[in-house]
Each structure stands twice: as C-alpha cells, then as structure tokens.
Amino acid sequence: MIARLFMMTVGFGLAAGGGISLIAYMNYIPAGLTLLDYLTFIFQRTEGAVFAAGLFMIAGSIYWPEKN
C-alpha cells in the first residue's frame, strides 16, 4: 500500500513537471512552428520521456495486482 502511494506520488511529480514543460514549449508554435515541427521537437526533448514515465508510473500503481 505504501509502495503504491509512493509510486503514484513520484509518477504524479514526474508527469506534472514534464507536462508543465511541454505546455511551456507551446509558446514556440506562434513563433512559426507547425504542429508536426512541435511534435518532432517534443520527441527530441527529455521532458517528453519524463512525462511518459510519470504517466506509466501512475498507471502501474493503479493497475498492478496487489498481493493479498
């Protein structure tokens, strides 16, 4: 139970940090980037991986079977 709570908390922190950075990078879109350029830029940055890892940890903490 404590491990699930810890995993969810760490996952939430990673997802929040990565998501805020990805939203901040949306300021590049009005500067002339297209949506495809933006997505290419995001996949090259570390924040995209941090966001995905956070979502994976949250989903893992919710759906991982618990030992009884």
Image (cartoon, rainbow, N blue to C red):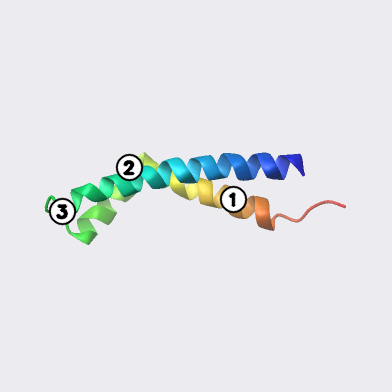
| Residue type at tag 2 | Arg
Which residue corresponds to mark 2? 45
Quadrant occupied by the N terminus: top right
Q: Secondary structure at mark 3?
A: loop
Q: CA distance from mark 2 to mark 3?
A: 19 Å
| Residue type at tag 1 | Ile
Say left or right for 6 vs 56.
right
Q: CA distance from mark 2 to mark 1?
A: 21 Å
Q: CB atoms at circles 3 and 1 under 8 Å apart?
A: no
Label placed on residue 40? none
| Residue type at tag 3 | Pro
Which residue corresponds to mark 1? 58
**Residue found 28% across the figure and 55% down from its top:** 39
Compare marks 2 and 3 and give the one earlier in the sequence. Answer: 3
Which dot, 2 or 1, sits closer to the camera? 1
Q: Residues within 10 Å of mark 3 (few under 14, many from 20)?
A: few
**Residue found 33% across the figure and 49% down from its top:** 23
